[in-house]
Image (cartoon, rainbow, N blue to C red):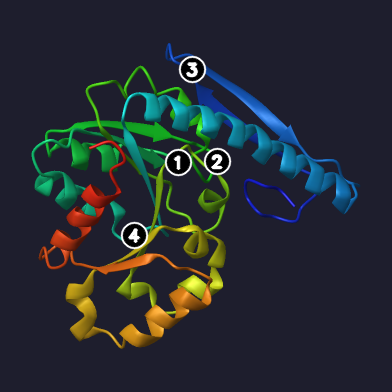
Amino acid sequence: MCKDCGCGDANHAHGHRHVDTEGREYWHTHEHDQEHEHGRTIVVEKDVLSRNDAIARDNRQWLDARRITAFNLMSSPGAGKTALLEKTLAMLPHGLHPAVLVGDQETDLDARRLRAAGERVKQINTYSSCHLDAAMIARELGTFVDEHANLLLIENVGNLVCPASFDLGEHVRVAVLSVTEGEDKPVKYPVLFSSADAVVITKTDLIPHLDWNREQCHACIRKSGSRARIIELSARTGEGMDAWIRYLQAMMRHE
C-alpha cells in the first residue's frame, strides 16, 4: 500500500513537486515494485515515518527554544478550518502573536482569506501529496516563522487519514468536525480523533436544520479512543468561540 495515497496498487510511481527555500522547483518520484512482500511495505512505511518524526522532534525543539506554541488543525475538506481560523485571528487577545501556515494541494485561496485578518499567513502547496509533513514545516522555521511569533497555527490539508500519521512538531493536535458530516466520522477515522488533544465541532448554527444528535456524536468521539476536550462552536455566529479562545490560551506553553 502506498503511504501517501492509501491505494493498493503496487505497480506505479508518484511524482512529487517541491519548492526549496529559494523558490526553485524540483520533482522526484516514489517507485513501487510490482511484486513485494507486506514486510517490505511495513519497513518502508516505518522508515518514512521515522525520518519524519526525527524532523518533527527538531521542529518542536526549535519552537520550544523560542517559546512558540504550535497547533495542528486537521479535518476533512469543508469542515470549516479556514472559517474557524478567520474568526480566531479576529478574536485573539493582546499578547498572542500568530504566524499561520496553510496547507492545500493547489491554490492560495485560503491563505488570501486569512491574510485579510492582518496577520502573517503563508500558503504551503503540497501538489501530489495529501498532507503536510515535518520537512515542509521545517523549511518555514527561522524564515517565515520567526521570533516575533509566540503562536503557530497550522491548517493541514483537508483529509481525515494521512495528516494524522505525520507529526509536524506541533504541541497541540486539533481535530475539526462539522455537524454537516454526521455523527460517525470519529469511529470511521479513529486515528485522527484518538490522537487529538481537542475536537472542535463546527457549524453548530446549522443544527436546527439537520438531523444531528449531539449525544451520539460525543459517544462516537469517545468510542474512537479519544479523551480530547470537545468544543462546540459556530465561527459564523461566534457562539462557542470564547471557549475555543480560552482553550488556545490555556494550552500556550510559554505565556
Q: Earlier in the sequence, mark 1 or mark 3?
A: 3
Residue 110 lies in quadrant: top left
Q: The residue under label 4 is which amino acid type?
A: Gly
Q: Specify the quadrant that holds the C terminus.
A: top left
State the image coordinates of residue 115 (x, y, percent, origin top left): 18, 35
Query: Considering only vertical position in the picture, is 210 above or below 45?
Result: below
Determine contact: label 2, label 1, CB under 8 Å: yes
Q: Secondary structure at mark 1?
A: loop
Residue 208 lies in quadrant: bottom left
Determine contact: label 3, label 2, CB under 8 Å: no
Q: Which residue is mark 3?
A: 20
Tell me what residue is drawn at x 12 percent, y 33 percent.
118
User: In terms of depth relative to the viewer, which is nearer, 142 or 185?
Assistant: 142
Q: CA distance from mark 2 to mark 1?
A: 7 Å
Query: Considering only vertical position in the picture, is 185 above or below 7?
Result: below
Q: The residue under label 1 is which amino acid type?
A: Gln
Q: Which residue is mark 2?
A: 129
Q: Which residue is mark 4?
A: 78
Q: Secondary structure at mark 4?
A: loop
- Residue 185 falls left or right of residue 70: right
User: In terms of depth relative to the viewer, which is nearer, 209 or 107?
Assistant: 209
Q: CA distance from mark 4 to mark 3?
A: 29 Å
Q: Earlier in the sequence, mark 4 or mark 3?
A: 3
Q: Which residue is mark 1?
A: 105
Q: Residue 235, can we see it?
A: no
